[in-house]
Image (tube, rainbow, N blue to C red):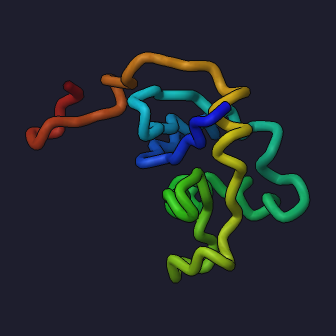
Amino acid sequence: MDYFPEVIQVIPTEDYRVYIYFDDGSIKLFDAKNLVGQGVFAPLIDREKFLGSCKVLNHTLAWDLKGNYDETECLDLDPLELYRTCPEVEEPAGLFKSQSGQRV
């Protein structure tokens, strides 16, 4: 595989899943339910922590637990593994809200 995927956007959900947007235009869905609460990922069992610290760091899905955007201190996942193993999905239109507060 000559292509090395880079994550450009992530959208976490209340049910511990993350929509992952890759630089080739694909959208994958990562289910983190089995990850949260385990080992170094234990703090992510707190839903607010899971949602609020989910970022793109190191060109991949990451959680910035300290909130300082330090790429050496985040919890990140291998983008190639995410690209290979996560199912491809459609744009999650129901997650987006218009400026009036209604879902678009």
Nearer to me, 58 or 19: 58
Give the residue displayed 84% in from the left and 64% down from the top: 40
- Establish if 73 lies above or below 9: below
Measured as percent of width and height from the top left, residue 31 is found at 68, 32
Measured as percent of width and height from the top left, residue 94 is found at 33, 24
Residue 14 lies left or right of residue 38; in this view the side is: left
Residue lying at the far right in this picture: please name it. Answer: 39
The mark total stands at 0
- Establish if 45 lies above or below 22: below
Measured as percent of width and height from the top left, residue 80 is found at 68, 40
Give the residue displayed 67% in from the left and 31% down from the top: 1
Assign the C terminus to one quadrant of the image. Answer: top left
Measured as percent of width and height from the top left, residue 79 is found at 64, 45
- Establish if 38 lies above or below 64: above
Residue lying at the far front in this picture: please name it. Answer: 2
Give the residue displayed 79% in from the left and 59% down from the top: 41
Give the residue displayed 31% in from the left and 23% down from the top: 93
Nearer to me, 52 or 30: 30
Q: Quadrant of residue 88?
A: top right
- Establish if 75 lies above or below 98: below
